[in-house]
Image: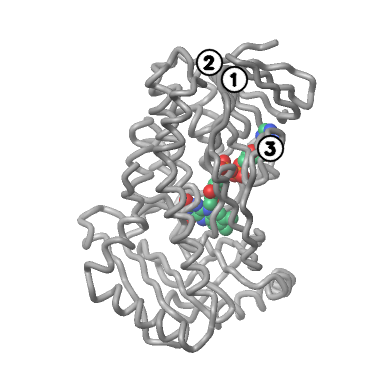
């Protein structure tokens, strides 16, 4: 049996960030295993795929504490301005970096680039061992440790097991941790798009009758598209040829960025909100999408997940000799409850307000967008969560 202080199931954004964070903050004194079924080099990795995500300022500040931002910034694109609008209606709101007195409102990274960077970084840490390809198959908890059996027969022992294995977490299932699920009956279609006009660091979110469209600025003048559609519309959209797809996107989004010139490979993600009330149990903690997975409408998924990671790391440091001790886990649980539930409910309310085309809701949301734009007191709370400047 291989002995570790901490075993992390899942080596994507949450699992790898956590391993590197604990390693850095504990001055490399804890031994860590990361169990992951997929290698980054193959495009099949579900967590380090061709998606791009927006990192908030709060996330950047956490990444800096873990010494992860300097190198990541080399392949990140700054968001300098955000434009939110409702197709065919007057309401629109704009947020500029000058309003918050920062160089950027956030940054966009391609997950596949992050995967390669993390892999390279982890290989320089002797006390982090990546067990890949492998997956957790069986868990047995004793008083002072947890035993984990992998699908290839390896046996691991740790003082703490962390589930970072995504929304369909096998670890949570094996330990019977319940999950609340809400199906939004929407699918996110993603692709990288080449646009005629320089994006100049502008990000766009446009609410249309078929669902929200987000375009984030990327390197090489590309933009990352997330287009949320009802499942049958998504299926049709996925089956269109590139020319028809561009035409359909152009008609839904408009001409603010000029012509959409080229479209890369398309992928789709069915959208559900999953939430686990319990994010700990004996010798077990849950982080990232395994704890809560959100609709991408407000780009809050990893920006919330990294706050789990930062808090769990801080809690572990309070009792470094036993990272799975009851006091560590109870501190982690209590410090995360409010932020997790508030961010999840704010995100699902946004989905419902902006995905419906009832006249009253349409008027309300247009008034809402105008009010947010004009009244700084209203804009502030929204801005704080968008920027990820949330107390933990
Ligand atoms: C279209 C889209 C756009 C998004 N945009 C944003 C954004 O702009 N900003 C933002 O913050 N977030 C965004 N998100 C959310 C963000 O991508 C996720 O929150 C984040 O990537 C989740 O990372 P994770 O590591 O928690 O989970 P996952 O990426 O699901 O990784 C789980 C890992 O666990 C592994 N695994 C599974 N089973 C086992 C097992 N039995 N044993 C071991 N390992 C296992 C899997 O192979 C996988 O690598 C977006 C999501 C989508 C779908």
Disc 2 element? loop
Q: Residue visible at 41% across and 35% down?
A: 310
Please provide percent x and percent y for residue 85: 41, 77
* One can see residue 221 in this view: no
Residue, disc 2: 31
Cα distance between the residues tagged 3 and 1: 27 Å
Please provide percent x and percent y for residue 221: 45, 61
Cα distance between the residues tagged 3 and 2: 27 Å
Tell me if label 2 and label 1 are in contact, CB under 8 Å.
yes
Q: Residues within 10 Å of mark 3 (few under 14, many from 20)?
A: few
Q: As rendered, which of 48 and 286 lies closer to the eye?
A: 286
Q: As rendered, which of 222 and 251 lies closer to the eye?
A: 251
Rendered position, 41 above or below 228? above
Disc 1 element? strand
Q: Residue visible at 72% across and 30% down?
A: 135
Residue, disc 1: 129
Quarter of the image with the N terminus is top right
Q: Residue visible at 56% across and 17% down?
A: 159
Q: As rendered, which of 180 and 138 lies closer to the eye?
A: 180
Rendered position, 283 above or below 183? above
Q: How many marks?
A: 3
């Amino acid at each position: 049996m291989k002995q570790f202080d901490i075993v992390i199931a899942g080596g994507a954004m949450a699992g790898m960030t956590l391993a590197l964070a604990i390693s850095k903050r504990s001055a490399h004194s804890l031994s860590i295993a990361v169990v992951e079924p997929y290698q980054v080099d193959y495009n099949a990795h579900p967590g380090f795929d061709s998606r791009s995500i927006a990192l908030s300022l709060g996330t950047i500040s956490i990444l800096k504490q873990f010494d992860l931002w300097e190198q990541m910034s080399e392949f990140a694109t700054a968001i300098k301005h955000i434009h939110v609008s409702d197709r065919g209606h007057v309401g629109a709101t704009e947020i500029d970096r000058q309003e918050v007195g920062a160089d950027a409102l956030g940054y966009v990274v391609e997950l596949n680039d992050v995967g390669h960077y993390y892999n390279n970084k982890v290989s320089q840490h002797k006390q982090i061992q990546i067990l890949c390809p492998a997956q957790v198959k069986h868990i047995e908890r004793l008083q002072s440790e947890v035993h984990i059996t992998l699908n290839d027969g390896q046996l691991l022992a740790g003082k703490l097991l962390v589930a970072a294995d995504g929304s369909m977490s096998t670890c949570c299932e094996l330990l019977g941790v319940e999950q609340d699920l809400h199906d939004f009956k929407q699918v996110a279609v993603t692709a990288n798009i080449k646009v005629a006009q320089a994006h100049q660091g502008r990000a766009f979110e446009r609410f249309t009758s078929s669902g929200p469209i987000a375009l984030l600025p990327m390197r090489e003048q590309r933009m990352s598209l997330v287009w949320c559609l009802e499942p049958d519309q998504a299926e049709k959209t996925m089956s269109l040829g590139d020319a028809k797809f561009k035409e359909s996107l152009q008609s839904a989004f408009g001409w603010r960025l000029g012509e959409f010139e080229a479209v890369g490979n398309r992928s789709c993600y069915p959208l559900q909100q999953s939430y686990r009330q319990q994010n700990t149990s004996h010798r077990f903690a849950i982080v990232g999408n395994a704890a809560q997975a959100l609709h991408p409408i407000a780009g809050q998924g990893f920006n919330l997940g990294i706050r789990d990671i930062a808090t769990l790391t801080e809690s572990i440091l309070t009792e470094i000799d036993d990272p799975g001790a009851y006091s560590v886990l109870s501190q982690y649980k209590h410090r995360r409850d409010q932020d997790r539930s508030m961010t999840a409910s704010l995100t699902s309310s946004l989905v419902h307000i902006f995905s419906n085309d009832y006249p009253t809701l349409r008027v309300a949301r247009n008034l809402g967008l105008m009010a947010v734009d004009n009244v700084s007191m209203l804009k502030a709370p929204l801005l704080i969560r968008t920027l990820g400047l949330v107390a933990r």
